Image (spheres, helix red, strand yellow):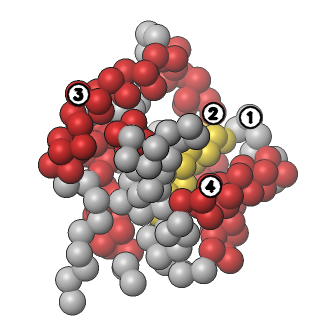
Amino acid sequence: MIDEAHAVADTRRWLERAVIGLNLCPFAKAVHVKAQIHWAVYLAESDGGLLDALLAEAAALLAQDAAVRDTTLLIAPNTLPDFLDFNDFSARAERRLARAGYDGVLQLATFHPQFQFGGTEPDDIGNATNRAPYPALHLLREDSVSRAVEAFPDAEEIFERNIETLEVLGAEGWAALDVGPRAATP
């Protein structure tokens, strides 16, 4: 079982080396440097309480000023190891957030160690754009996303640029980043 400190350390290393290091998300560096990311961890092995945890994190995010907490990363290191189960859960989470009144207020981005885009093969390097050490649900403020997109020229091209970056890097280069989960120390 992965503990909270381990989950956060592994996910932070992934954020710094892959997301920021490869510039997969040009908006991530600013919130990371300003310590505006809230790192939350759901430790249970069952996903039974994960929706409640996500809703609690959504409320807590909006209760803070964006200058203090602009985004939340909810890491679930011990649950939903199967990507298809996680993908189904993510769809339920989107619907539940909308029913709770967060549609147009928060966005949900998802990451998983076996993330796979539709129409791709499991080993397609492009899938790495959404591969994190553990299943993770990323809550983003719509206002912040809109401001970031306005400030970034050609924001719609980010995805294509990321695929190109990863294709140049290749599977060996991705593995060399060492952004997967580290073995727990006893």
Asked whether residue 134 is in view, the answer is yes
Residue position marked by numbered label 2 in the rendering:
142
- The numbered mark, 2 or 1, whose residue comes first in the sequence reads 1
Choose between 24 and 115: the one closer to the eye. 115
The label nearer to you, 2 versus 4, is: 4
Q: Which mark is residue 104?
A: 1
Give, as a three-letter code, the residue at label 2: Glu
Residue position marked by numbered label 3 in the rendering:
168
The quadrant in which the N terminus is found is bottom left
Give, as a three-letter code, the residue at label 4: Asn
Real-space Cα distance between discs 3 and 2? 32 Å
Real-space Cα distance between discs 2 and 4? 22 Å
Q: Residue furthest left?
A: 176
- The numbered mark, 1 or 4, whose residue comes first in the sequence reads 4
Q: Label 2 neighbourhood size at 10 Å, few (<14), some (14-19), many (20+)?
A: some
Q: Which mark is residue 87?
A: 4
Marks 2 and 1 in Cβ contact (< 8 Å): yes
Indicate whether 138 appears above or below 6: above
Give, as a three-letter code, the residue at label 3: Val
- The numbered mark, 2 or 4, whose residue comes first in the sequence reads 4
Indicate whether 85 appears above or below 161: below
Picture coordinates of residue 123, whole percent (x, y): 37, 47
In this picture, residue 88 sits left or right of residue 111: right
Q: Residue furthest bottom?
A: 186
Give, as a three-letter code, the residue at label 1: Gly
